[in-house]
Structures are given as structure tokens and as C-alpha cells.
Image: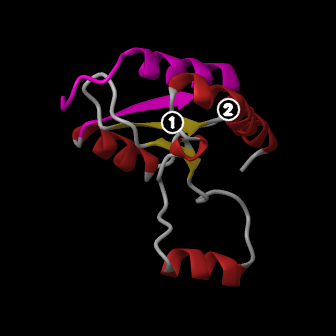
Amino acid sequence: MKDEEFRNQAAVFEYWAWAHKSFGLPEFALMSYPAGGLRHKSTAGKLKATGTRRGIPDILFPVARGGFFGLVIEMKSQTGRLTDQQRVVIPWFESIGWRAEIAYTATAAINALQQYLAEGARGRP
């Protein structure tokens, strides 16, 4: 993961560490998916063997709100672009009733999370 992406994603989780209680949710409700970044070949092989898949969004929030089953956020740097695999995976999440957002800053990701939480629980889309 690029440094800019890393810093932005870390800021989202720093925000959530103190904000989660105000939403009545546990801190673990917001989680990341460790698919990106450089790794030793043996570590990459172990991750793949245990189910890590390419294209999964960086942040997962499996909490139903506003007619959605959950929220996924793909973090990108200001110059970042979706990979071919992400262009398949993100619409798939949407097709099964999840909301998906692409965030180029920590503020955008936090705003997406806050907006999602403000929608309230309304069941299935």
C-alpha cells in the first residue's frame, strides 16, 4: 500500500477508535482487508492459500444501514486507479446489497462512513 493510502486508511481507523461508541457499535465492526502491499513470497503464498483474494476493498463494515447489508470502502491515493479486479469485485458487492465507496482521502472515507451510519437501519434493499 502506498504511503498516502496507508496514512489515509490509518486516519480512518484512528477516527473509528474514538467514534465507534457514539454509534453504539464495537470497534471491531470496522475492519480492513490485508490484500495490498509488498510481502515476502512465502507470506503472499500463505495469504492466498488461506483465502486472501485480489480486488477486495480495503475497508469492510458489515453493518446493515439504509437498506444495505454493509459498506465497503476502497482507499486510493490522489492519483490512484482501480485495478481490473477491483472493477469486478466492487460492483459485485453492490449487486449483493452492499454500498461501495471509493475514497481518495481520509476525510472522504470518514464522511462516507458517517453518512452511511446516519441513514439508519431500514432492512434489505
Residue at the disc numbered 2? 12
Label located before the other in sequence (2 or 1): 2
- Horizontal side of residue 64 vs 52, given as left or right: left
> Which residue is depicted at the point 63% across and 57% down?
36
Provide residue 95's location: percent of width, then percent of height: 23, 40
x and y percentages locating residue 115 in the rendered image? 47, 16
Pointer 1: what residue? 73
Label 2: which secondary element: helix
**Three-letter residue code for mark 2:** Val
Between residue 9 and residue 115, name the one nearer to us: 115
Q: Is residue 12 left or right of residue 90?
A: right
Answer few, some or many: residues within 10 Å of disc 2's Cα (few below 14, many 20 plus, some between 14 and 19).
Answer: many
Q: What numbered label is drawn on residue 22? A: none
- CA distance for labels 2 and 1: 11 Å
Region of the chain picked out in magenta, as a range: 97-125
Membership of 108 in magenta stretch:
yes
